[in-house]
Image (cartoon, grey):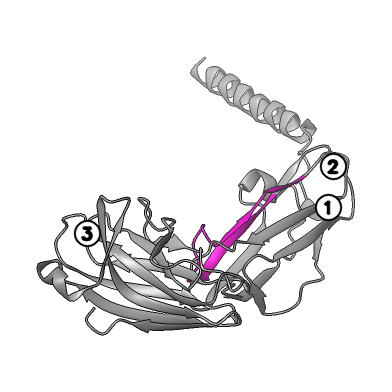
Amino acid sequence: MRNIFKYLLFGLALMMVVIAGCDTASQEVSPVISPDDYPVATFTTDFSADEITEGDSIVYTITTDKMIDRAITFHVTQKAGSVDDHDFTYEPAVLQPYTTEVELKIFFLAENLVEETEDISFEISPISMADKYLLNPSTEYPEHDLNIVNYNDPTLLTINFYWDDENDNDIAVWSDTDDYPQTLWSLGGATTAVPEMDMSIWLADPAGDYYVNIFDWGNPSFNYTFVFGLPDGTMQTVEGFFDVDNLDQYTLDVAYDAYDTYRVIKVVNSGTSFTITKISNS
């Protein structure tokens, strides 16, 4: 009886193996998803230089070789360089479903900061994994290494004023020409910005002397730096020390009979160019 029971167990086990094998053989394996049929994106632009001037822009045309039913968004990603997000901007380019072309524009901003040539390395591509998955892996995303050249307004003097502490310091521009003797010319550099900027002296203004003055707000003495953007595209830097403990050494101009400002820079406007000199006692 015991032997018969062993045979029954063996037969049952064998039958289960056969049934399981038949069931496995009858199942269909899902095909591996291949990206070979995904669209390939290409990128074209008329801009091929390695240098661009502030205020200019670059347009890329992005084209795919087939339509899909999903949108794909392309971005500009900075890889390296000395610029920051104040130097360039762009609108993400969205390739809409069932379309094959979109434009991406990159704008290099003229922000009136007088600075040396900067550089950037950037790539155009989708940044999300979901968007990247919608394109064929053979897609080659363009990279561009670019120098960004400073732009100065050719009609006027651009003034940037920096200082080395955390206090709020300001400048005023005065005219001392024959037409406008000792006249408050501009308070464009009297805000809360760092640097303070002024663009009030134009080549078309009356020829003669103008002065850049620092306000005495009761702050401690500080080191200052002026960076001037000249109409011919060049720049000039002037550094100095504003000594509030010896204000008598400066020429005083009082704004609105209430605010003391002191001359530190002289600008001579010839009508065709500017000559900038630091006043010797400043």
- Which element is circle 2 on? loop
Q: Is residue 192 left or right of residue 28?
A: left
Disc 2 versus disc 3: distance between alpha carbons? Answer: 65 Å
Q: Nearer the viewer, mark 1 or mark 3?
A: 3
Q: Amino acid at mark 3?
A: Asp
Q: Nearer the viewer, residue 126 or 178?
A: 178
Q: Are marks 2 and 1 in contact (CB under 8 Å)?
A: yes
Of the numbered discs in the image, which one, if any, rests on residue 216?
A: 3
For residue 81: magenta? Answer: yes
Rendering coords of residue 264 (x, y %): 30, 74
Q: Amino acid at mark 1?
A: Pro
For the point 69% across and 66% down, the residue is 56
105 shown above or below 247:
above
Q: Are marks 1 and 3 in contact (CB under 8 Å)?
A: no
Instruction: Provide the residue span drawn in magenta.
Output: 74-94
Please identify the quadrant where the C terminus is shown. bottom left
26 shown above or below 71:
above
- Which element is circle 3 on? loop
Q: Nearer the viewer, residue 120 or 274?
A: 274
Rendering coords of residue 48 (x, y %): 76, 77
Rendering coords of residue 197 (x, y %): 44, 61
Disc 1 versus disc 3: distance between alpha carbons? Answer: 65 Å
Mark 1 sits on what residue?
39
